[in-house]
Amino acid sequence: MAKKAAIKKAKVRSGSISRTKTAPKIYKGLAGVVTDTTAVSKVMPETNSLTYRGYAVQDLAANCTFEEVAYLILHGELPNRRKLNTFKKKERSQRKLTKAHIDVIAKFPRRAHPMDTIRTAVSYLGTTEVAWGGEPLESDLERAINLLAKIPTMIATDFRFRQGQKRIAPRTDLSMAENFFHMCFGKIPPKKVIRAFDISLILYAEHSFNASTFTGRVITSTRSDIYSAICGAIGALKGPLHGGANEAVMEMMKRIGGSKNAETWLRNAFANKDLVMGFGHRVYKLGDSRVPTMKSCLRDLTEWAGDTKWLEIYEIMENIMVSEKKIHPNLDFPSGPAYYLMGFPINLYTPIFVMARITGWSAHYFEQNADNSLIRPLSAYGGKAQRKVKPLVKRK
């Protein structure tokens, strides 16, 4: 009995039993709660590096293309040349949308946010076949590659329509990054810009049990299909406390307007206790390991565009936040102005995030299905005690 009591005390201390004698312990936002295992990615505490399948993301960004990283995340290992060519050929062959799919996108209200339209476009794709969770991995891998191929086309098609322009069909002779610029703008920018965009996709591709990934895994755990899981993940990513933060960063920088206003704006935000977008992260304690790579891309884009304003604002805000508040920027802080210099409208930033994160979401869908348990947490009731109904009219 004494041994059982000691084990129970140890479990309570570790958090595996979240009860006290008086009330259950609440972990708001599931902060600090470990819900499952994953082999897809991890932030290594000893190096403070985000890793995909064991590879540091900064190393992947320096040495790989997004297609190579997509293969790694989906299959578990980096491809050799033959496997990469086969993977690229399959992805490129599936970029086209059907006429019916294009007609659906054409009917979207122009005022709708692109995150709403991409969510609905993915949902439509899910109606074209009957799919359920727990199917063979090979079937869902085919669906994941189809989503990887078609999501950029969906985003670019909607972008063109909302501009009042004709859609531009995808090409099969271009990389994913090149093809996206082609479909959006009808031209491909210099290699420096394409490389910066490709790197941004690598950096956004995966990040363990973040809000959107966890949402997707919850849906997967019910034995729902991959399209439903991805639609749910897109809905979670839309929020400004998650994927929508890159949009919020650029809107904030535009309000600041220039480097001469940056410090005053930031100190006013401190005084008013306003949220400064693009800073802080629940996982990283010593700074987001993806930021130096993306900041280097921002410098390259600043030089290419001949526009130093956004980098100057960035530097001032970063210096003050780190030196005075000990809060480091996260990936959204450099990516917002980077996408702006590339020419993308602000409301397209989070859909671009979707283009990258479809790889991570899909990998987690596979993982959840492989060793599934319904995700169903408990709650602590804080409402009224049970009571009787007092009818307004007596029933016979």
Image: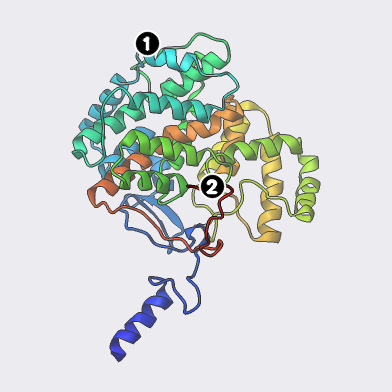
Q: CA distance from mark 2 to mark 1?
A: 40 Å
Q: Residue at x 50, y 77 (%)?
A: 22
Q: Residue at x 48, y 35 (%)?
A: 353
Residue density around tag 1, few if under 14, some if 14–19, many if 20 or more, within 10 Å: few
- Nearer to us of marks 2 and 1 is 1
CB-based contact (under 8 Å), mark 2 and mark 1: no
What is the quadrant of the N terminus in the image?
bottom left
Q: Position of residue 11 (x, y in %)?
A: 37, 76
Can you say whether 322 is above or below 158 in the image? below
Q: Among all residues in the image, which is located at the extreme bottom?
A: 2
Q: Amino acid at mark 2?
A: Val
- Residue 133 vs residue 219: left or right? left
Who is closer to the viewer here, 2 or 61? 2
> Visible in this render: residue 321?
yes
Q: Position of residue 351 (x, y in %)?
A: 49, 31
Look at mark 1 in the image and give the residue it sits on.
99
Who is closer to the viewer here, 107 or 189? 107
Q: Residue at x 35, y 24 (%)?
A: 125
> Visible in this render: residue 65?
no
Q: Position of residue 113 (x, y in %)?
A: 56, 27
Q: Check disc 1 and report its element: helix, strand or loop.
A: helix
Can you say whether 99 is above or below 51 in the image? above
Residue 291 is labelled as 2
Q: Check disc 2 and report its element: helix, strand or loop.
A: helix
- Residue 45 vs residue 282: left or right? left
Residue 170 sits in quarter: top left
